[in-house]
Image (cartoon, helix red, strand yellow):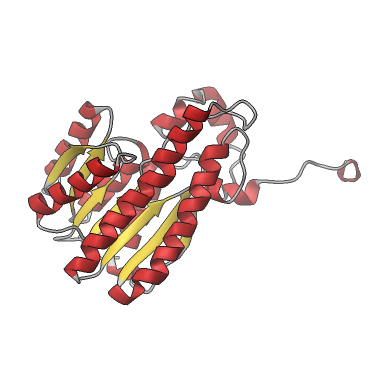
Amino acid sequence: MSSNCLEGKIALVTGANRGIGRGAAICLAEEGADVLVNYRTHAAEAAEVVTEIEGLGRRAMAWRADVSDRAKMEEMFHGAVKHFGRIDIVVANAASSIRQTVVEAQWEDFQHTVSVTQFGVFHTCQFAAQHMVERGKGGKIIVISSIHAEFPFARSGAYNMSKAGINHLARTMAGELAQYRINVNVINPGWIDTPGERAYTSEDVMKKAALNIPWKRMGTIRDIGRCVVFLASEDSDYMTGSVMRVDGGFMLGLALPRSREDD
């Protein structure tokens, strides 16, 4: 991949103030893209990302909008086009997870997770596709999903369901949008060190658990950000409808319980 492979491109990243979205926004800017930094909370962190991107010599703008609010998302897309002139790359990253068993799950919490993680991605991808089709110059849509789309982790029913759903949505869109030369691809991150993960897991537990991952460490936001850059670049021109797992071998490390015969 050449240096500044995204020079002159305009990117919009949802949930870009922290975690994986932040990593994606910074990595895109490092390769030459201007970035709209979407956020819902933690405005100070969004401002930090804008400052960092501008420090790389790129343009950036923070925009507060809840991805589950369709009207606010439409307003944001119109604002991004008005400010930057167009959108070439969209990263549908924003998500939410309230961890509860299916038996214990509160309906309001379940609805919130689905509204953000599934419907929010739909709003993002649809508005992106509409703009790119109308413009007629192709484009790149990248969906940040999860290995939760592949494995039914306990206490994550709403999140598992949402991630599986957006993967199928992305494949559907890939088929529909190929004629417009709009690439739609998915990244399934593994266990990534993010503020959201740290809200549920202590530093000590994370360090010990990371040793069970074949790569022997947690994933970083830059691990995902660099994959986003690849899918946003011309190097991925012939890829659409693909799901890329970036997990350090996490899924390979999952094993059935040892049987008595193994002892």
The picture places residue 178, in percent across and down from the top left corner, at 35, 73
Is there any visible trace of residue 121 in the rendered image? yes
Q: Is residue 120 above or below residue 9?
A: above
Observer-nearest of 26 and 165:
165
Tell me where residue 52 sits by quadrant: top left
The picture places residue 172, in percent across and down from the top left corner, at 44, 64
* Image quadrant in which the N terminus is located: bottom left
Tell me where residue 182 sits by quadrant: bottom left
Q: Residue at x 51, y 23 (%)?
A: 202
The picture places residue 58, in percent across and down from the top left corner, at 12, 49
Tell me where residue 130 sits by quadrant: bottom left
In the displayed structure image, the side of residue 93 where residue 49 appears, left or right? left
Q: Count of labels shown? A: 0
Is there any visible trace of residue 248 in the rendered image? no
Q: Residue at x 62, y 30 (%)?
A: 101
In the displayed structure image, the side of residue 124 where residue 57 appears, left or right? left
* Image quadrant in which the C terminus is located: top right
The picture places residue 95, in percent across and down from the top left corner, at 40, 39
Observer-nearest of 104 and 226:
104
In the displayed structure image, the side of residue 240 where residue 60 appears, left or right? left
Which residue occupies the extreme right position in the image? 261
In the displayed structure image, the side of residue 35 where residue 67 appears, left or right? right
Observer-nearest of 168 and 236:
168
Q: Is residue 177 above or below residue 28?
A: below
